[in-house]
Amino acid sequence: GGDIGKLSICGTINDLATTGCTPLALSLSFIIEEGFLVSDLEKILSSIKKVLDDTDIKIVTGDTKVVEKGSADKIFINTSGIGFVNNDIDISPTKIKVGDKVLLNGSIADHGTAILSRRKEFNFKTSIVSDCAPLNSLVKDMLDASKKIHALRDPTRGGLASVLFEMAQTSKTNINIYEDKIPIKKEVLGIC
């Protein structure tokens, strides 16, 4: 599913896209700990390049700093982005209304399960891979199909429950979901 490079780029692209913005350009900065393997940096850069090539989004500025060994956790990546919003689009959790539907574009918890399976303190193996991906094309297709979309989110840290809770608080509405309607892979459910 990816590495820290893909995750950082997709995170910024998706933050822009889920506000109704068409991402145009990104900044990309690295803080690299002395001794970080060049081969690992090359893998990260390769995954970043693949996402950028697939989305036709450009890096327009950036910075790289190398810090003393022990001063960082190997590598930090900082990204930010710009884009444009069509004036017909007004997406925000404050726009959520009673009667709106919650739609998911895939199963939940794949990314979290993939990450947990690679941590040393958890001792399990899984075939589940991270579903980390740029969502800008999907969001564009959705907005081309309907201008009645009130809110979008990429449920990252905290997952679906946290995102829906935050959206309910922001919109001052209740959001009812039904567990049996939430798509979740059997392997993920078994691990949970």
Image (cartoon, rainbow, N blue to C red):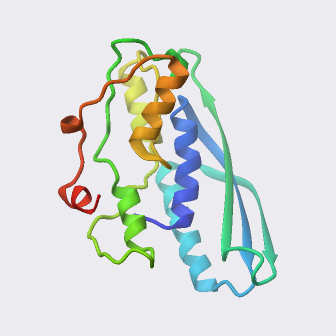
Image: 53 above or below 104:
below
Image spot of residue 28 (x, y percent): 69, 58
Q: Quadrant of residue 143?
A: top left
> In this view of the protein, can residue 187 be seen by the observer?
yes
Please report the residue visible at 47 percent of the width from the left and 40 percent of the height from the top.
Answer: 136
> In this view of the protein, can residue 90 be seen by the observer?
no
Image spot of residue 67 (x, y percent): 81, 77
- Name the foreground residue: 130 vs 86: 130
- Name the foreground residue: 24 vs 162: 162
Please report the residue visible at 32 percent of the width from the left and 31 percent of the height from the top.
Answer: 103
- Judged from this view, the residue extending furthest toward the top is 98
Please report the residue visible at 52 percent of the width from the left and 58 percent of the height from the top.
Answer: 7
Q: Quadrant of residue 82?
A: top right
Q: So how many labels did they put on this image?
A: 0
Along the horizontal axis of the image, is 79 left or right of 93?
right
Image: 99 above or below 118:
above
Please report the residue visible at 66 percent of the width from the left and 49 percent of the height from the top.
Answer: 26
Image spot of residue 147 (x, y percent): 43, 17
Give the position of the C terminus as an image quadrant: bottom left
Give the position of the N terminus as an image quadrant: bottom left
Image: 188 above or below 159:
below
Along the horizontal axis of the image, is 59 left or right of 132?
right
Image spot of residue 112 (x, y percent): 40, 58
